[in-house]
Image: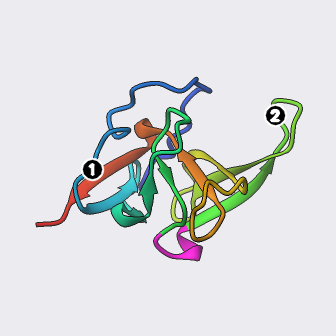
């Protein structure tokens, strides 16, 4: 049975996947479900790996989060419920207008040969 990853809140920083630039798939660190394609990753300057869309809409679950006194949208793995980060609809010139800021500790990267 997969376990759920719920990292403590953390500020931006040099996570292990922040500067990853190879082609591949980002998966859930807990259950290994596919979440993001490398082609949707971009540098938003927020300090977390950022993507403009998930591999499939049903791959992630979006939940309203008011834990810091503001309304944000939490992103969880739809397969196991692990916390992945937050999504913001603030543009950045992406094709979707979305910025999925994900925690490196919640993801694994599988390079494509």
Q: Give x and y (percent) for residue 65.
A: 79, 44
Q: Which residues are magenta?
A: 55-59
Q: Give x and y (percent) for residue 26.
A: 36, 57
Q: Give x and y (percent) for residue 37.
A: 38, 66
Q: Is residue 45 magenta?
A: no
Question: Residue most toward the front?
Answer: 93
State the residue in front, 25 or 92: 92
Specify the label residue 100 is tagged with: none
* Majority secondary structure of magenta residues: helix
Residue at horizontal 82 percent and vertical 30 percent from the top = 68
Q: Give x and y (percent) for residue 104.
A: 42, 39
Mark 2 and mark 1 in contact? Answer it, CB < 8 Å: no
State the residue in front, 25 or 83: 25
Mark 2 or mark 1: whose residue is earlier in sequence: 1
Q: CA distance from mark 2 to mark 1?
A: 32 Å
For the N terminus, the quadrant is bottom left
Left or right of 28 in this view: 85: right
State the residue in front, 12 or 96: 96
Q: Secondary structure at mark 2?
A: loop
State the residue position of label 2: 67
Q: Quadrant of residue 7?
A: top right
For the C terminus, the quadrant is bottom left
State the residue position of label 1: 21
Q: Secondary structure at mark 1?
A: loop
Residue at horizontal 81 percent and vertical 34 percent from the top = 67
């Amino acid at each position: 049975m997969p376990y759920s990853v719920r990292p403590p809140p953390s500020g931006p920083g040099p996570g292990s996947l922040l500067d990853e630039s190879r082609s591949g798939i980002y998966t859930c660190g807990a259950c290994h479900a596919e979440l993001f394609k490398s082609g949707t990753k971009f540098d938003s300057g927020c300090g977390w790996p950022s993507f403009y869309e998930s591999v499939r809409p049903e791959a992630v679950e979006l939940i309203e989060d008011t834990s810091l006194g503001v309304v944000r949208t939490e992103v969880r793995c739809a397969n196991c419920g692990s916390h992945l980060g937050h999504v913001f609809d603030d543009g950045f010139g992406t094709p979707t207008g979305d910025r999925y800021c994900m925690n490196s500790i919640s993801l694994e990267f599988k390079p494509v040969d």
